[in-house]
Image (spheres, rainbow, N blue to C red):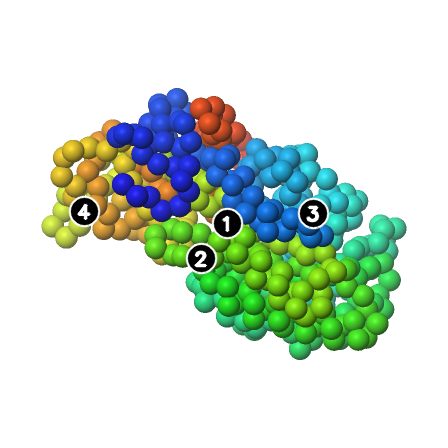
Amino acid sequence: MTLPGSPHIAYRGTDLSIEDCALNDLADRFGTPLYVYSRSAMLAALGSYQRALAGRDHLICYAMKANSNLAVLQTFAQAGCGFDIVSGGELKRVLAAGAPASRIVFSGVGKTRAEMREALDAGVMCFNVESEAELELLSQVAIASGRTARISLRVNPDVDAGTHPYISTGLKGNKFGIAHERAVATYQRAAALPGLEIVGIDCHIGSQITEATPYLDALDRLLDLVEAVEAQGIRLQHIDVGGGLGITYTDETPPEAGVLVAQLLARIDARGHGHRKVLFEPGRSLVGNAGVLVGEVLYLKPGDEKNFCIVDAAMNDLARPAMYEAWMAIVPCRTRTTPALTWDVVGPVCESGDWLGRDRSLAVQPGDRVAVLSAGAYGMSMASNYNTRPRAAEVLVSGAQAWRIRDREDAATLFAGEHLLPLG
């Protein structure tokens, strides 16, 4: 059976394996629901970027919102990555994973005064500023802290990434970034404000982008601004082209990362900007195809209009299908020779929106395990405790070794910070 995504996840005989570990064995050992990631798949995806950028002044900043487990961050930090963060909590995670603050860029439209102060104290490489109001506040915080905030402006180029509206970020109607037509004036304002040092320009147009054209269009508009800004006497040291490269969930054919990077570098060079440092912010493309969510079949519930395969994984474990109507492959962890039937794969949460996949052909019985593929990105990082459901355990695999990198929660931990009213 040919599976979408990483070659590190494949059938060996009747058993679905991730690297050299059978998923059924991991489920026996760690329980379900269970997220499992391939370390080799993550490093292979990163390697595609690194090879294309060899010899260039660059920094690959992993967009950690895709998957923020400490062991995942540690893996990328040890491989030389920087990090793209969007909150004070993510800053603390990156530092806890052993990454230097000097390789962190701080993005996000709603940075608080406290988060700015924490990032300045840590010594982050750069703030990607997303509004003129943020620029003013960051100046105030930097002066009060006795520090200088290194900044780039995240510019909204008004380029359609051709993706889901919820993950499109580069259009005029999106909340992100500074409008293209306001960028030069905003750079001039930044240059006049105390406590700020302008170091770059940033752009990000969306997520799960599966063609190169939107990137090239956005880059051209970004380079137009670089030239206009420098004509005002403001020097820009780096160009941050963002992330958003898609992965294969079913039949998508996004460009290979190295091919896309080569196209972008060629455009940068052709326009005379090859001397600048280049930043990339990949997230999903590094971890998405490296992970699976394993669940156990609880019940089979045939019906007049629909057959339901009820599993112990749910929308609180994996929000993408319910939130985005996302299609993700679902396959058995051990194949059967019995005929397959068509099932809606659903979870135990008390919502009709609690589904992982509709109309899937599966040969399964209660007690079997199934795997949702390409679940390494925006799976565990978006998980919740809805219905007071403990979040899943996470496991990282390298070859035949498997490490539990997050304990399964228990109910007591979910309400440990809550308080009953005094008696009487």
Mark 2 or mark 1: which comes first in sequence? 2
Mark 3 or mark 2: which comes first in sequence? 3
Left or right? Give the position of 270 relative to 309: right
Which of label 2 and label 1 is nearer to you? 2
Please state which amino acid type lies under the numbered disc 4: Thr
Which circle marks residue 104 in the picture?
3
Q: CA distance from mark 2 to mark 1?
A: 10 Å
Q: Give the SS element for disc 2.
A: loop
Q: CA distance from mark 1 to mark 4?
A: 30 Å
Left or right? Give the position of 114 relative to 366: right
Q: CA distance from mark 1 to mark 3?
A: 19 Å
Mark 4 or mark 2: which comes first in sequence? 2
Q: Residues within 10 Å of mark 3 (few under 14, many from 20)?
A: many
Task: Read off the residue under disc 2.
Answer: 254
Q: Residue at x 31, y 30 (%)?
A: 12
Q: Residue at x 62, y 66 (%)?
A: 267
Mark 1 or mark 3: which comes first in sequence? 3
The reply to whether discs 1 and 3 touch (Cβ–Cβ < 8 Å) is: no
Q: In front here: 362 or 120?
A: 362
Which residue lies most toward the top here? 29
Q: Quadrant of the N terminus?
A: top left
Please state which amino acid type lies under the numbered disc 1: Ser
Task: Read off the residue under disc 1.
Answer: 285
Left or right? Give the position of 200 relative to 396: right
Q: Residues within 10 Å of mark 2 (few under 14, many from 20)?
A: some
Task: Read off the residue under disc 4.
Answer: 342
Please state which amino acid type lies under the numbered disc 2: Pro
Mark 1 or mark 4: which comes first in sequence? 1
Mark 4 or mark 3: which comes first in sequence? 3
